[in-house]
Amino acid sequence: MPNNLTPTEFLYGCSIDPAVLELRPDYRALLLVVEGINPQADARIADELIGQAEAHAAALLASTTVDQLPQIDAWREAYRAFGAKPQRTRNSLEALTRRASSGLPRVNALTDIYNAISVVHQIPIGGEDFDLYDGPALLTRASGDEAFDTVADGEPTIENPDAGEVIWRDGTGVTCRRWNWRQGRRTALSENTTTAFFILDALAPMSDTQLEAAGEALGQAMQSLGAAVQVSQRIAGAQ
């Protein structure tokens, strides 16, 4: 079912289950809807940002190990709180930071931009096709019978999350498993996306100022992808 909500209706309909905040009362999500993206726009900014991210990761890892970086350590603790093993299922920030030293993956302009900003600002970011979302987003703990549209062994498949796992979902099913580990196929960004939905996940010690700076950087990068780009946003969670 295509999303028929306005960006404002969608953003203020998004919610965080109190059961998630019981795990991490310091959790905040900066939610952005970006309209007016031109799929044919010159996306050279993605190359620039990827280069910045790879250099930043190299500088960070020159003096410390990945698991000791403050935000990655915080997310490892958050994963343990709902029973996930961070050594086996790495949060998206850790996975990208580890890969950046040898070169970040290239997917499409939208994904490349938010992956780069994730590494530079050391914050997990998820990106979805707004028009493919079924109603507002909900961050909750899984019952275990929700549908997650993904790929296994190269073939499309439907999986179920573990009971108690933290998931993002919409009216149809799971859009991202284990808070910010793996996004699904159904709402994935593509080269045809014209309206995107981004989730920026923050835990202490990240400040609200740092969270807002990451959102500002993402919004500015999106402005290069079309003359009619408009960005709407809202912070949900601990205030």
Image (cartoon, rainbow, N blue to C red):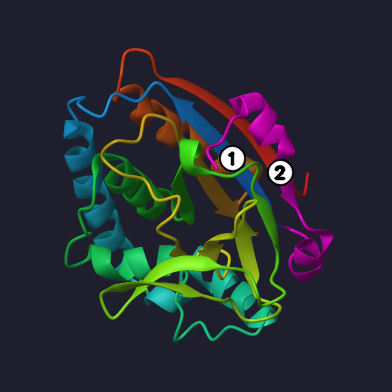
Name the residue furthest front.
Answer: 1
Task: Residue 153: give x, y in percent of width and height.
Answer: 28, 81
The numbered mark, 2 or 1, whose residue comes first in the sequence reads 1
Q: Magenta stretch? A: 1-26
Q: In this view, does 11 lie to the left or right of 86?
A: right
- The image quadrant of residue 168 is bottom right
Q: In this view, does 115 lie above or below 110?
A: below
Q: In this view, does 142 lie to the left or right of 91?
A: right
Task: Residue 31: give x, y in percent of width and height.
Answer: 59, 40
| Amino acid bearing label 1 | Leu
Residue ID for mark 2? 236
Q: Is residue 180 left or right of residue 107?
A: right
Assess whether mark 1 and mark 2 are in contact (beta carbons under 8 angstroms): yes
Residue ID for mark 1? 31
Q: Is residue 203 above or below residue 72?
A: above
**192 or 65, which lies in front?**
192
- The image quadrant of residue 134 is top right
| Amino acid bearing label 2 | Ala
Q: State the residue at coordinates (59%, 27%).
A: 7
Specify few, some or many for label 2: CA neighbours under 10 Å numbering under 14, 14-19, or 20 or more.
some
Q: Is residue 18 magenta?
A: yes
Can see residue 70? Answer: no
